[in-house]
Image (cartoon, rainbow, N blue to C red):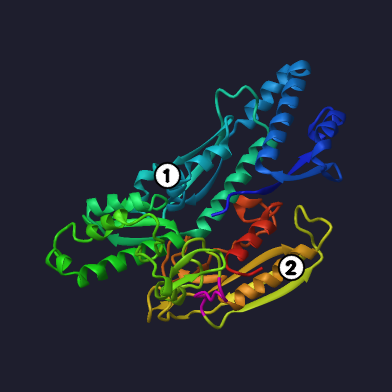
Amino acid sequence: MEYIKNITIIIDEVKYEDPGRLKKILKSYKPDKKGCCYIVKGTFERLENLVDTLQSARHQSSSATHGQTFQQDNHVSNHAKHLDVSGVVMDYINQKCADKLNKIQGTKFVITTQPDLRAVHSQPNSLVRVTFRPRCDSSYPSDRLHDDFVRQQFITFYQRTASDLQVTSVHLSPHECMELQRKFPHLLFKPSNGNYERTVVGPFALIAKLNEFLSQNIQSSRRSPVNKVLADTPSSRTLGLSSTFSRDPEEETCPICMESILAKDKKTLRCKHSFCKDCLKRAFDYKPICPTCGEVYGILIGTQPDGGKMIVTQNSSSLLGYEKYGTIIIDYHIPSGIQKEEHPNPGQPYEGVSRRAYIPDSSEGRMILELLRRAFDQRLIFTIGRSTTSGRNNMVTWNDIHHKTSTHGGPTHYGYPDPNYLNRVRDELKVKGIE
């Protein structure tokens, strides 16, 4: 999963008592100016330094000339902000992406989660509240620019993480679970309902590797005379696990079956990852992506129900942050029907949905529109599952290509302004081979 590379911040000149000093600080960042606002683009590290510099400048100015005002502003800005997110995704981020989360919150901010994430596995569809607040020991007051900067970083990181996560269940003994945790350190293994049931959360490519690995070890156990004798013992499948660690390090191992790749059976993809031909064929029958890095090969077809419509209209009103342009309105309609074999509960009815989304009628927005058309034709926009808002099952839901369903409210309300949105949705489409 790719971490945040380029972002955008908007700085309101009105909020600074010394516009000349602000202009001097921003000079090396080559900002675009629209009205009274400066728009600055760059890497996370570069813009984090800019935010710290601006915050320090405001602190010095306030301390020198407006001590009482400084205290009042600090009191107001310390009001905590929050948003509600998936408990399963947040639990994965806390346990497997702690370094990236710490990088986002930095030394002056803290991101907390309620309720306790240890209870999430018993309620997999529950939401948790993520709260953003300045650290009590911060030497500078929090201001809106820095607060929004941290929140936007978290939202971008959360959405990219959530779009790549998959949840599955496996039957493992405690010893097997420990072996697999060592072998797949980026997967999260949690106890489930039964004694040996485990819920596993992680990126799609790693979940696919885990399933293939377990399947191959079960087949190996059935073929092996030794393992046939031990087939009913609790540690029978761990024999396959431990045997992989004694293999000659010079031999190339197939990431799917974890066996040595014979030269005549080797298949190397353009992303330079190699597999057994038969293993790769089975993986591509399921989904045409590299099981190691997720690069798409061929055309990816999703599980969006048939019979849907995507209707596009335009109007002259503008979206926040895109005041020069009109608005493209996308109306999706997916009718109710009966689930097929590719869906979670074949033969059962599902409830359809109608959704409206908004994108700016700019050259970049029109390009995104054409990419979304392709995604819709490839059945990638919607799927069938459990609604995160109502908790109801067998519903048509958004897949993992994010849409703006409101014209206002910012990212936490699926609306504008959100200067990074078009870049994010382009990245999400690229992951699915649409670019």
Classify mark 2: helix, strand or loop.
Answer: helix
Q: Which residue is mark 2?
A: 367
> Dot 1, crowdedness within 10 Å: few (<14), some or many (≥20)?
few
Q: Which residue is mark 1?
A: 95
Q: Amino acid at mark 1?
A: Gln
The percent coordinates of residue 244 (x first, y second) are: 31, 57
Q: Nearer the viewer, residue 158 or 408?
A: 158
Classify mark 1: helix, strand or loop.
Answer: helix
In the displayed structure, 240 sits above or below 154; it is: below
Quadrant where the C terminus is found in the figure: bottom right
Q: Is residue 392 visible?
A: yes
CB under 8 Å between discs 1 and 2? no
Q: Amino acid at mark 2?
A: Met
Q: Which mark is residue 411?
A: none
**Residue 117 placement, left or right of 356:** left
The percent coordinates of residue 63 (x first, y second) are: 73, 18
| Magenta stretch: dominant secondary structure | loop
Q: Which residues are magenta?
A: 297-305
The percent coordinates of residue 130 (x first, y second) are: 51, 43
Find out whether residue 232 is within the magenta segment.
Answer: no
Tally of marks: 2
Which residue is rendered at x = 15% and y = 65% of the image? 226
Give the mark nearest the N terminus, 1 or 2: 1
Find out whether residue 298 is within the magenta segment.
Answer: yes
Q: Nearer the viewer, residue 250 or 149?
A: 250
Real-space Cα separation, disc 1 to disc 2, in angstroms: 37 Å
